[in-house]
Amino acid sequence: MESLHQKDHQTILTRFSKYSEQIPDDLITEILLRLPSRSIARFRCVCKLWASTISRQDFTKSFRARSSSRPQILFACGKNNLKLFLSSSPQPHQNTDVNSSSIAASYHMNLPCGRFYTLGHIGSLVYVREGMSLWKICNPSTGQCFTLPEVKIHSWIRTFFGYDPIEKQVKVLTITGEHGEDNHQVLTLETDKMSWRTIEYDTPHSPISAGVCINGVLYYRAYEHSLPDPCMMIVCFDVRSEKYSFIRVRESSLGAMEPETTTLINYNGQLASLEMQRSFSEASTSFDLWVPQDSGKEEWSKHTYKFPMLRNEAIHDTLYFIVGTNEIVLIPRKVSDPFYVFYYNLERKTSRSVEIRGMKEVKGKKLFAYVDHIEDLKLM
């Protein structure tokens, strides 16, 4: 015999079903597009319609486009010896006069891994090198992880990741060398069966720096072997065509090429070189920004900036990036409580701090951080 409560509940459901209207599919799509990636990943399990909607190519394309307009800072910490703790926070809008603010970090996932030697980021993906040539790729938005096919190692190996904005593809470039001979191989991540393919090259060279990918071109520093004396140059690898070109910087601009003190960066959509100079005797930090003066990037101009630190922790071991068009962000390499990142506006010459909440779980841990992180729901 039904209770009075059960009868009332059934009556409510009947009336709701009779008088309510079904939510249009396009409205459901719009609602889903406004949700964080972590929520959308869970909502695949709600029903077949939602799973189908979220998996559609037009939906993932629209979601990535919206995410690209509001990039994030991705944080990675070694939670213990076997996992990486991945989280992210919005990249604060740079046109603000507020000296300090607070933003919450969103937890993504724990990435299982052994002892890692290299950790990097491109677009929406995190890549981890375990051992000499074992690479693990992870999408924090979907939780999907996979391992790349291994490469035969010779005397040395260097691996770079680049993104082709036209074909929307991530490619991996690996260069191995032995007895003066190089072997150049490329792998495309978005193929059904990933495999390495050998590509042709005209100029043998040995990479000596990390790479930066800007508008479909991967840049890194290398020594050229074809001359009697090895010569340093910047290698330009077109990710789409898989062809090389080279920049030989003039002697007057060699300060931009110093591999021990400078880092190649993306500055407002163009290649630049950044050198941070810390002064521990004064509460200030200065840095040199080298920017190419001509289209051939052979002559570079140096601009020196100096700005006061907002807190003592920013003086110590710090990661630094250029974000947007005219801001440098400094991120401490160890998580503190409270935890701050620092911004300096190159045009206004003003500093500000942003507290990142939600990082207590990894307090005291070494931090890896990456700007311009994009959430992407596309499954590989």
Image (tube, rainbow, N blue to C red):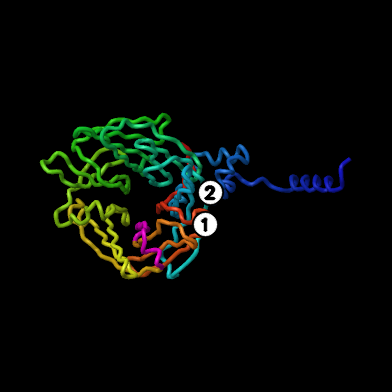
Which residue lies at the image location 45% right of the left edge and 48% below the top edge?
78
Identified by mark 2, the residue type is Leu
Mark 2 to mark 1: distance in Å?
30 Å
x then y, percent, for residue 231: 15, 45
Stretch in magenta: 311-325
Q: Kindly state the secondary structure of the residue where label 1 is placed.
A: helix
Q: Is residue 266 above or below residue 189?
A: below
Q: Which badge, 2 or 1, comes first in the chain's sequence?
A: 2
Q: Read off the residue under disc 2.
A: 33
Tell me if mark 1 has few (under 14), some (14-19) or many (20+) residues whose alpha carbon lies within 10 angstroms of its own: some
The part of the image, by quadrant, that contains residue 199 is top left
Which residue lies at the image location 34% right of the left edge and 62% below the top edge?
326
Q: Is residue 320 magenta?
A: yes
Q: Nearer the viewer, residue 153 or 350?
A: 153
The part of the image, by quadrant, that contains residue 286 is bottom left
x then y, percent, for residue 271: 27, 53
What quarter of the picture does the N terminus occupy? top right
Instruction: Kindly report which numbered mark, 2 or 1, lies closer to the viewer in this rendering.
Output: 1
Q: Is residue 288 above or below residue 44?
A: below
Identified by mark 1, the residue type is Lys
Tell me if mark 2 has few (under 14), some (14-19) or many (20+) residues whose alpha carbon lies within 10 angstroms of its own: some
x then y, percent, for residue 268: 32, 57
* Image mark for residue 120: none
Decide if residue 292 is on the left or right side of residue 51: left
Q: Kindly state the secondary structure of the residue where label 2 is placed.
A: helix
Which residue lies at the image location 18% right of the left edge and 38% below the top edge?
203
Q: Read off the residue under disc 1.
A: 360
Decide if residue 4 is on the left or right side of residue 364: right
Q: Nearer the viewer, residue 130 or 233?
A: 130
Q: Is residue 8 above or below residue 274?
A: above
